[in-house]
Image (cartoon, rainbow, N blue to C red):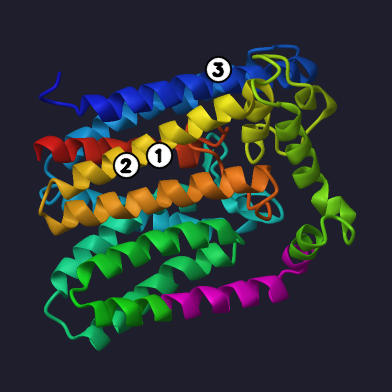
Amino acid sequence: MAKTIDLTLVILLVILSFLGLINFFSASYYFSLKNFQDPYFYFKKFFFKITFLGFLLFLIGNFLGKKLIYYRKIFLFFFFLFYLTIFLGFLPQFRWQESVARWVNFGFLSFQPAEILKPFVILFLIFLMTRIKKFSLSQKIFIFLIFLFLVLIPIFLQPSYSNVLIIGASLGTVFLKSLKSKKEIFLSIFILFLVFLTLSLIGTSFWQYRLERLISFLTQGKVFSEKYLQVEQAVAAVSSGGIFGKGLGKSEIKILGLPQMLTDSIFAIYAEETGFVGSLILLILFFLLILRIIILGTRTKVFEKEAFVLATAVWLCLQTFLHIASNIGLFVPTGVILPFFSYGASGQLAIYFSLGIINGFKNG
């Protein structure tokens, strides 16, 4: 087994997945019973659609990661496939909900293309940068910005600014990794900062609800109080957990009702039941996972592998931070799922698949 997998990575993945299963069962039990008269309704979906299928995709990713360059055409095919499906969300006949373009619905299957796209868009840029490595800095920046806008603008218009931030940061990591001098890196960082600042300003001015949510967060609910309800209840749940928590299955907020309890606010349930100690253990586990994948990347001198590992580390780190920070009142709610814990198959499966690719680097 040691010859085909990285034991440390797999152990961390199994532990986090197991904790995610336990926490999700606890969080979804009452909600499932109340709405579907089946206490296992959402748990069964979570297990089969995320945990089981996730480990299957981990194995597929592991297989493909062993010969990353050889299977380049496969990765490029899926990049174009999922990139094109993003635009289907803007068509009424393919929308999952009338006002939401983030989801694509084919009737028998619904998913979020921007979530699934993440590993493939990272790989596409990596392959692109290897083709233009001899270009001048100005040419590289121009090509990168064109690609960045082509990818981010349709996601920005869905609207899904959290994914814009995560994908943009991951792609920025790949681009910076392709540069050699400190001067080139600092200049590129400044340009990236201007890009995200511009998108942030446009986003808060073009979509009124975002500005209201931001104002509500900054005023702690004194203005647009209804926009602060999720933060207020999540923080109350986390605080009530104390040092050791109330115990598994004993969350009170899941009975009272917490907005987006199974997705955006799942950490609040975990913190309420396991307390500060359990939350600290979870943070350590995430830190060890991210550290491990970085170590696996630095062991290879192949640009494609190093860049993918670093970009994935930034993706997981940023996604975990945004979720937890919004649950403890340090950041405005972004709708970001917590890896291995939240209900959201598209995003979770992309994570499992990406970790499989990284594990495959061990023998590639």
Question: Residue 331, how many percent across, how many down?
Answer: 65, 54
Question: Residue 271, how many percent across, how many down?
Answer: 64, 29
Mark 1, other Cα within 10 Å: few <14 / some 14–19 / many ≥20: some
Q: Which residues are magenta?
A: 192-212
- Compared to residue 173, the image places residue 312 above or below, namely above
- Which element type, helix, strand or loop, lies under badge 3? helix
Tell me the kind of residue under disc 2: Leu
x 36%, y 35%: residue: 288
Q: Which residue is mark 1?
A: 287
Q: Which residue is mark 2?
A: 291
Question: Residue 106, how many percent across, how many down?
Answer: 54, 42
Of the residues under marks 3 and 1, which one precedes in the sequence? 3
Viewer can see residue 58 = yes
Occupied quadrant, residue 272: top right
Tag 1 near tag 2, CB within 8 Å: yes
The CA distance from mark 3 to mark 2 is 24 Å
Front residue (pair 233, 44): 233
Q: Quadrant of the N terminus?
A: top left
Question: Residue 268, how many percent across, how many down?
Answer: 67, 33
- Does residue 111 appear to the left or right of 221 in the view shown? left
- Which element type, helix, strand or loop, lies under badge 1? helix
- Does residue 331 appear to the left or right of 79 in the view shown? right
**Which residue is outermost to the front?**
243
x 43%, y 36%: residue: 286
x 34%, y 49%: residue: 312
Q: Which residue is mark 3?
A: 22
- Which element type, helix, strand or loop, lies under badge 2? helix
Mark 2, other Cα within 10 Å: few <14 / some 14–19 / many ≥20: some
Tell me the kind of residue under disc 3: Ile
- Does residue 227 appear to the left or right of 244 in the view shown? right
The CA distance from mark 3 to mark 1 is 20 Å
